Every structure is written in structure tokens, then in C-alpha cells.
Amino acid sequence: MILRARLAQSLSRQVRTTHTGRVPAVRKDSSAVQPFSEIPGQWKNSVANLYTFWKMDGLRNIHRIMVHNFNMHGPIYREKVGYYESVNIIKPEDAAVLFKAEGHYPKRLRVEAWTSYRDYRNRKYGVLLKDGEDWKSNRIILNKEVISPKMQGNFVPLLDEVGQDFVARVYKKIERSGQNEWTTDLSHELFKYALESVSHVLYGERLGLLLDYIDPDAQHFIDCITLMFKTTSPMLYLPPALLRHTGARIWKDHVEAWDGIFNQADRCIQSIYRQLRKNPEASGKYPGVLASLLMLDKLSIEDIKASITELMAGGVDTTSITLLWTLYELARHPDLQEEIRAEISAARIASKGDVVQMLKMVPLLKGALKETLRLHPVAVSLQRYITEDIVLQNYHIPAGTLVQLGLYAMGRDHRIFPHPEQYRPSRWLRSQSHYFRSLSFGFGPRQCLGRRIAETEMQLFLIHMLENFRFEKQRQVEVRSTFELILLPEKPIMLTIKPLNASR
Ligand code: 2DC
């Protein structure tokens, strides 16, 4: 509340001083297209904006500031903070126009901190950071191995095994508690689950993170990812090159984090590579994404390594936090939890042990994941540099502009989602239009490469957990999001886990 008041205050002060006295432009449907310079917003004094932004702790509140800006300016506004300049939109129809103008080589905001590290250490970009023809040719090959629906059948058994092991681990924890229940902040267990899952798919091998003793290097890798995200966000607004040359702490921490990530990924990749050279014979069993790519021999080893590292690093905090938010929502909605559990057990019976089949019979569970990502998106926004002139909300936007869709703000807008504050997975079932509303993984050829792995991993986790446990929450306190490049819960979420079958 205090923050919100402060935010409103300082933002309105800013309007009075930096805006030229004109009231925010109102869209007149019949009028001629308005010029780019007429778009409302604070884009004239980027240094002052950056200062206000820092003062308000804007960094951690970027998502709430966007909501605030849409409330103040309407469905489109222009903004410049530090060296970061964009046009922001919120409406699904505008998102459709944006994505139609993304061109053949869609480009999103370049995260300079990430590219600077690669340049500094002389490492190749993977598809996360590549652009143009190089991006396209790598992405096409990776798509077949990582995101094509055909591959899901290969991933399912690997992910299912990790899900089962997680259940066994939770039973053990419950037993050890001596109370027939376990109250905990599950985030650290979920990080391990997520890394174990994505590694099993990428390397076809287990890391053993769900055992009692775990490899300290693997734990270090997890810590490095969190640090990498945390140190990225301040560098969105200040050029990393500047920080690098002034010897800033933030840059040093960032380098250390990526070093830890690359060292661990290199170790995993090397070990698979060596095995493959010793024993190149295909066993018939699916060997994992890395070995498939190496045997396919269509990308250079350096390109493969770069993208595999990105998939591994991108697959930890993202899925684990989404699962944590989902358990939090299900704990707050016990009836819904029961309903999804019933859907799962019906699907289990009807699919007769065929897990791939089963995943096609759980629409409410899938709706729950969409609903989680609507309220608690991993990415606060989606961006594209448009490749042609377009018109948004009756304003002319020239080619080359960075246009940003406020995903968090869109998910909480009552004009787009009726009763947005309510967690209602069934809203995704109805045959009514979801036109450009389900965008948590992005859209089109540049959408999240890890999407298929993430979705399957999260669905299987929830299936196994709901088949075995009930989730409860002690107090009904609202947990808000905080921005550390991705959106995270601002405080720990405590859950109580109880076995469903008390006789066990
Ligand atoms: C953050 O203003 C807010 O998928 C910025 O798995 C704009 C921006 C640019 C790039 C986005 C980032 C935001 C959020 C996190 C994203 C990232 C691109 C990829 C990354 C959306 C919206 C993420 C989480 C990847 C991370 C991969 C990993 C190896 C670093």
C-alpha cells in the first residue's frame, strides 16, 4: 500500500514536471492516424526518469509500474528510462499487430549484460542471443529436437521418472518430520527438481539431485543462476560496458555467476561427448537432446554447447517458480485442487498406463498452469523490434521501434480477463476466444525454445504430486511478485504437504 501511494505520488509529480502540459491523448476512432510524437508517456527526459525510477525502487517494481502507467496513459504509452526506450501496449489485438510485423528474423530486446559476458569470455551466443540468419538456421535445427510435438514422447518417460522420485522424496521428508505432514518453503526442492528434469532431457542422464547427498557443484550451479538473474536487471538500464570499465561490483558478480553456469554445463557436455566418442553405437533408446544433436551433425559443436547451456540455465528458476505459484494457488483453492485431482485420476484410468495419452486428458490441469502464468508470469513483458511501420491505438509507429507487450499488466486487466484477481483455470476451457491472450511462452518462431520441456515437466510434476498429496496453506496472506529479471515471489511461500492416503 505504502509503495503504491508513493509510486502514484512520485509518478504524478513527474507528469506535472516532465509532460508538456498536454492531457494524455485520447483515441478518437474516426480521426486520422496520430504521429509517433503524440504518444503519451514520459520519454523526453531519460536521465530524470532513471533517477525517479531508482528512487522508487523501480527495479523491483517494474511490473507494478507498468500497470500504473497503463492506468494513467491508457492502452499505449512511450517510455525512456536510462538507455532503454520502448512503446508499451497491453491489448491482445495490438499484440496481434505487433507479431505480424516481427519479420522473418524476430528480434527482442538485447540483454546487453548477457551478450557482454559472452564477448568478454569469448564464448559463442546460443539461440537465446543470436539474431538474423545465424539465429534462424540454428533455431530450425533445434526446433526439431527440442520443441516439436513429436519429441514429447521421448521426453515423457525421462520426466515421469523424475516426478516419481520427487514424490518418494516428499514421502521421506514427511516420515522424518514424525508428524505425518511437512510444512516447508518448497523452492529449494523445486530448483533441484527442475534442474534434474531438464538435465535428464538434455543429457539423457540423471544428476542425482533428489538424493540426500548432492553434488556441491550442482548446488553451486543453481545458486549461480539466481545470482545471474539478480545481477542482470540493473544492467538493463545502464550499459554493462560502463560498469565493466569502472570495475563495478554488479558486473563482477555477473561474470562470476555466468562462469559458474558455463563451467558446470561444460562438465556435463564434456562427459556426454566423451561417452559418445567411446561408444558411438546407437542403443535404440532415446539418448537425450545433446547426444541427438551431436549425432545429427548439423550444427557446430560450439553452437550446440552454447544453446544447450542456455536451455539448462533457462530451465531452473523459470519452471520451479511457476510450480511453486501453482501449488500456492491450489492450496488457497481446496475445491479446485480436488477437482483437478479428480480429472487426473480419471485420466490415469482412461489412459491405461500410457502417459503421453494421459497428458491429452487433463485440460483443467493445463488451464491451471496457464492461469498461474497469467497472474504470475515469468516474463514481465514480450518485446519485438518491428520491421515495418504499423498503427497501434491509432498512432503511427515507425519500423525499428522496440514495442513491448505488458504481459503482467495484461493478465491483470479486467477488460481483458473478467475478474482478473480470481484464479480460475476453467476460463481457459471455454471455447470462447483466447485470441492473443495465452502468451506466457511468447509467440511465433521466436517463442520459448524450452516450452515443450517446461510444459511437460510441470504437468507431470503436478500429476504426481496431486495423486499423492494434499496442499494446504496456513494463513491467507497475499504474496506479491518482485522483479529480478524474471518475476519471483517477494517472500517465501510456506506450504503444508499431507499424504492423501493416511495409511501409507
Ligand atoms: C525482462 O525489460 C524485462 O525466458 C526486460 O529462459 C525485458 C526482457 C528481456 C528479455 C527477457 C526478460 C525481460 C525476462 C526473462 C526472459 C528474457 C528472454 C529470455 C528469458 C524471458 C522480459 C527467459 C526466462 C530464459 C532465460 C534463459 C537464461 C539462460 C538466461
Image (cartoon, rainbow, N blue to C red):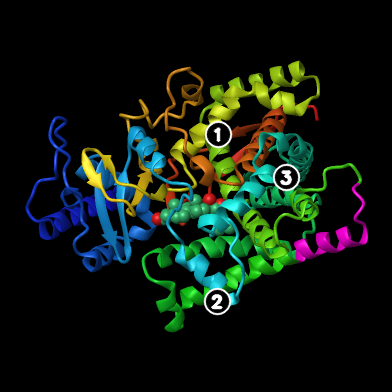
Q: In which quarter of the image is residue 178?
A: top right
Please tell me whether mark 2 or mark 3 is closer to you in this view. 2
Classified by dominant secondary structure, the portion drawn in magenta counts as helix
**Spatial CA span between label 2 and label 3:** 48 Å
Whether tag 3 and tag 1 are in contact, CB under 8 A, the answer is: no
404 to 96, vertically: above or below: below
Whether tag 2 and tag 3 are in contact, CB under 8 A, the answer is: no
Which residue, as the protein is rendered here, is positioned at the far left? 21
Q: Provide the residue designation for mark 1.
A: 369
Name the kind of residue labelled 3 in the image.
Ser
Q: Provide the residue designation for mark 3.
A: 177
User: For disc 2, does the CB lie below 8 Å from ligand 1?
Assistant: no
The local secondary structure at tag 3 comes to: helix
Crowd around label 2: few <14 · some 14–19 · many ≥20 (10 Å): few
125 to 455, vertically: above or below: below
Crowd around label 1: few <14 · some 14–19 · many ≥20 (10 Å): many
**Spatial CA span between label 2 and label 1:** 38 Å
Percent from the top left, x then y, of residue 187? Answer: 60, 49
Between 338 and 257, the residue placed more toward the observer is 257
Percent from the top left, x then y, of residue 259? Answer: 63, 71
The local secondary structure at tag 2 comes to: helix
- The span picked out in magenta is 267-282
**Spatial CA span between label 3 and label 1:** 30 Å
Crowd around label 3: few <14 · some 14–19 · many ≥20 (10 Å): few
- Asked if residue 496 lies left or right of residue 72, the reply is right
Q: Does the magenta stretch include residue 361?
A: no
- Residue 120's label in the rendered image is 2
- Residue 1's label in the rendered image is none
The local secondary structure at tag 1 comes to: helix
Name the kind of residue labelled 1 in the image.
Leu
219 to 314, vertically: above or below: below
